[in-house]
């Protein structure tokens, strides 16, 4: 049987919240798509938060996968990356606030 190798090139975000640190969800929902939706709905942050809006978007479907865990434990699983990286570990309260900032429905364009 002949084998075929496929290669896909994607852009990657820098820093501790790079796709490699946000788990497999970034393969299904590319970060460029999330950033585009955040821009269209004007849900991008206006200041630097401990938990960026992009990370919050990935946190929500992950929370649906781990329904028996709190946001902090879900965040730990979501950001379980290569050992040795100094990852930010926000409190449960910071994660709830990030979720509230994002909102429950798309914002209307102004």
Image (spheres, rainbow, N blue to C red):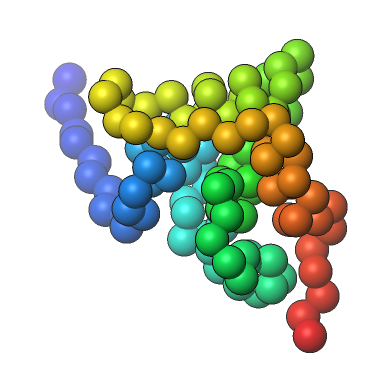
Displayed quadrant of residue 91: top right
Left or right: residue 79 versus residue 44 is: left
Does the rendering let one see residue 60? no
The residue furthest top is: 68
Say which residue appears at 63% left-offset and 38% top-offset.
Answer: 59
Displayed quadrant of residue 6: top left
In the rendering, at what x and y percent does residue 42 appear? Answer: 69, 73
Instruction: Identify whether 48 is placed above or below 18.
Output: below
Residue placed most toward the observer, 9 or 13: 13
Say which residue appears at 74% left-offset and 46% top-offset.
Answer: 97
In the rendering, at what x and y percent does residue 49 appear? Answer: 57, 55
The residue furthest left is: 2
Q: Which quadrant of the rendered structure holds the N terminus?
A: top left
Does the rendering let one see residue 53? yes
Residue placed most toward the observer, 104 or 93: 93
Q: Which quadrant of the rendered structure holds the C terminus?
A: bottom right
Say which residue appears at 75% left-offset and 39% top-offset.
Answer: 96
Residue placed most toward the observer, 107 or 24: 107
Say which residue appears at 79% left-offset and 63% top-offset.
Answer: 106
Instruction: Identify whether 64 is placed above or below 50.
Output: above
Count of numbered badges drawn on the protein: 0
Left or right: residue 59 versus residue 64 is: left
Left or right: residue 102 versus residue 75 is: right
């Amino acid at each position: 049987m002949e084998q075929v190798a496929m290669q896909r090139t994607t852009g990657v975000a820098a820093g501790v919240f790079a796709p490699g640190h946000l788990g497999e969800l970034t393969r299904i929902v590319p970060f460029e798509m999330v950033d585009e939706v955040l821009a269209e709905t004007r849900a991008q942050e206006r200041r630097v938060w401990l938990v960026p809006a992009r990370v919050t978007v990935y946190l929500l479907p992950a929370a649906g996968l781990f329904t028996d865990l709190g946001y902090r434990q879900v965040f730990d699983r979501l950001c379980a990356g290569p050992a040795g990286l100094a990852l930010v570990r926000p409190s449960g309260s910071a994660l709830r606030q990030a979720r509230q900032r994002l909102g429950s429905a798309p914002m209307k364009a102004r």
